[in-house]
Image (spheres, rainbow, N blue to C red):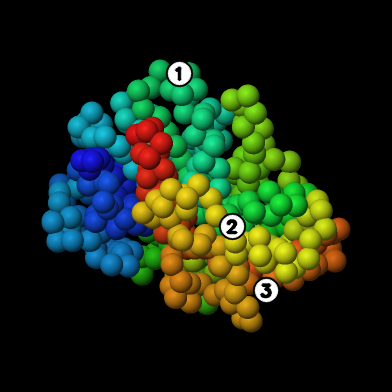
Amino acid sequence: MSKKRAVIIGATGAAGQNIVEFTAKHPWFEIGCLSASERSHMKTYREATQAAPFFRSMPPEEVMKMKVVGADHVDPRDYDVAFSALPSEVAKVQEAKFAEHIPVISTASAYRYEPDTPVLLPDVNPSHTAMIPLQREKRGWNGYVIPGPNCTTVGLVTTLKPLMDAYGVNILSMVSMQSLSGAGEKGLRADSEYRLNAVKNVIPLIEGEEGKVVKETNKILGSMVNGKLIDAEINVHATCTRVDVEIGHTEAVHLGLKEQASIDDVRDKLNGYKSEAQELELPSAAEQPIIVLEDDMPQPKRHGEYPQMVTLVGRLRGNKLWENGVSYVLTSDNLEKGAGGGAVLSAEYLLVKGLL
Ligand SMILES: NC(=O)c1ccc[n+]([C@@H]2O[C@H](COP(=O)([O-])OP(=O)(O)OC[C@H]3O[C@@H](n4cnc5c(N)ncnc54)[C@H](OP(=O)(O)O)[C@@H]3O)[C@@H](O)[C@H]2O)c1
């Protein structure tokens, strides 16, 4: 199979750099173009990323030397697929321009809440890709837009999926402790006001985030019935905070299950969960998507001891808040699983399914 040529738009930001890391040595994709704003136009990728580098491992020299192209100068027809890591308001226009011609896999929220658009996480809701023909027909696009979830929703829905399947979930309360890189370039650039304010601090508000978690959780865990997506009806309450951690979102989750379950059974369901992404052995899929740990784990600082695409769970116990109460703490890598790695995993799934 010849490699698919990818254009990465928003390639210089936090999520975009992560997509570049995942695609630079990918067996199925090759980087055809790195695109960003006019600020970065015609700079080398090294120059355009040097103020806020997020790389875990540096991309190869030939990628660092590539010239970044402003998004308005790119012709989508020169590529097979676009990965988008643009700010949402820019994504609304740019992603439509690309989707007219080619599939767009996005980390942005611009299209997440549209009724003809799935929010895809291949290890949770691969069946939602059935909406793609509908979207194409309605919008008259040759391509389509497939966004991934918000980086906070990713870990939450991954852990909810096996519990929904086994017992059903009635109600949930979640408090997030989200890392600075989740805020993108402004969260990690050393001289940014946002970052300086967050040092040794907890910011108890992330504008717009809680509503996203509520909507996306119910959309992603919804079911396809006769070609239509019916949202799950989980009563979700979210409090999202920013903490002084570089990478990795932590969430304290309290659930009320529909059916009674012992904590040992819940642990087995989480540890034993496998999805179509594992069955298909997609290159970026974790072998075991959820790992339950004991004692004082999970911790974002130690997430790197495990595969990055894994959701770690700990502090698993019952709660007396609700009937059939279960509580746990999770960590999920907001850049790998929550953005770049997640987008590339979606592209792998779409390719295997003949949709790309
Ligand atoms: N950070 C995370 O953990 C995370 C996780 C999941 C989803 N997301 C989503 O991913 C998207 C990107 O977030 P981020 O954190 O990577 O943000 P970021 O670090 O601020 O990066 C933004 C990117 O968009 C480009 N850009 C900005 N304005 C543009 C314009 N008018 N035209 C073309 N390109 C433009 C920037 O290029 P320049 O460098 O040239 O300015 C940069 O490449 C957002 O929608 C965010 O919600 C982020």
Q: Nearer the viewer, residue 191 or 239?
A: 239
Q: How far apart are marks 2 and 1 (CA)?
A: 35 Å
Q: Is mark 2 on a helix, strand or loop?
A: loop
Q: Can residue 288 be seen in this view?
A: yes
Q: Position of residue 316 (x, y in %)?
A: 69, 70
Question: Which quadrant, please, contains the N terminus?
Answer: top left
Q: Report the mark closest to the observer, 2 or 1.
A: 2
- Residue 151 vs 105, above or below: the answer is below
Q: How far apart are marks 3 and 1 (CA)?
A: 46 Å
Q: How crowded is mark 3: few (under 14 residues within 10 Å), some or many (20 or more)?
A: some
Estimate the x, y position of residue 191 in percent, counting from the top left. 36, 68
> Which amino acid, mark 2?
Tyr
Report whether residue 177 is seen: no
Q: Give the residue at mark 2.
A: 273
Residue holding disc 1 = 137
In the picture, measured across the screen, residue 299 lies left or right of residue 77, that is right
Q: What element carries label 3?
A: strand
Residue furthest front as drawn: 279
Q: Residue at x 53, y 50 (%)?
A: 275
Q: Nearer the N terminus, badge 2 or badge 1?
A: 1
Residue denoted by label 3: 315
Amino acid type at mark 3: Arg
